[in-house]
Amino acid sequence: MNNIIPSLLVVFMSIALLIRVLRQKCRLNQHLQWSKQRKMTIQLVSLSALNVVFNIPLNIVSFAHLCGLPADYGVEAEQYFYFLCYFLIFFFPFVCLFSYPEVVTKFKSNILCRKLRPNARVAPAFLATHRRP
């Protein structure tokens, strides 16, 4: 339960935060501009989804063991799932970084759609040397 409840709380609290923002905007009679809340929404949804995707397999196996599944079933997979949960931490900075549209466009232009530059020709350079008389 120490792993299942926090994973579920992350999902429910993320949804509650989005609902709170929407209700606050409606309460103050402000027009909801998704362009202003887009960055927060993308970051919140992607972090929650990342957390759920990496923790759900371990939660399902743990919950199945709590419900009566024999302990020898899923032992090998459970070891991989434990490792996968610790590997999750390394993806958080990348998710936060890719929530900025400027970074995404720069990444696409520099890495994915790199245009081939014309081959630069290399020529020998002549160095001026000073001769002593």
Image: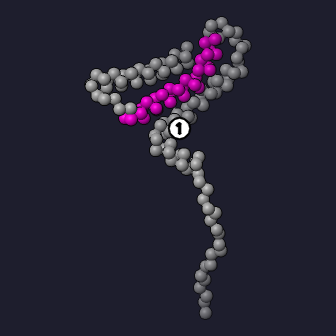
* Residue 48 in sight here: yes
Helix, strand or loop: magenta stretch: helix
Horizontal and vertical percent position of residue 3: 55, 18
Left or right: where 23 falls relative to 15: left
Quarter holding the N terminus is top right
- The residue under label 1 is 94
- For residue 89: magenta? no
Q: Quadrant of residue 58?
A: top right
Q: Nearer the viewer, residue 63 or 121?
A: 121
Identity of the residue drawn at 64% across and 63% down: 119
Q: Quadrant of residue 29?
A: top left
Left or right: where 112 falls relative to 42: right
Rendered view: 72 above or below 80: above
Badge 1 marks a residue whose secondary structure is helix
- What amino acid type should be assigned to the residue bearing mark 1? Phe
Quarter holding the C terminus is bottom right
Identity of the residue drawn at 52% across and 20% down: 7
Identity of the residue drawn at 61% across and 62% down: 118
Label 1 crowd bin: few (<14), some (14–19), many (20+), radius 10 Å: few
Q: How is the image coloured?
A: one colour
Horizontal and vertical percent position of residue 96: 48, 36
Horizontal and vertical percent position of residue 22: 36, 24
Rendered view: 122 above or below 112: below
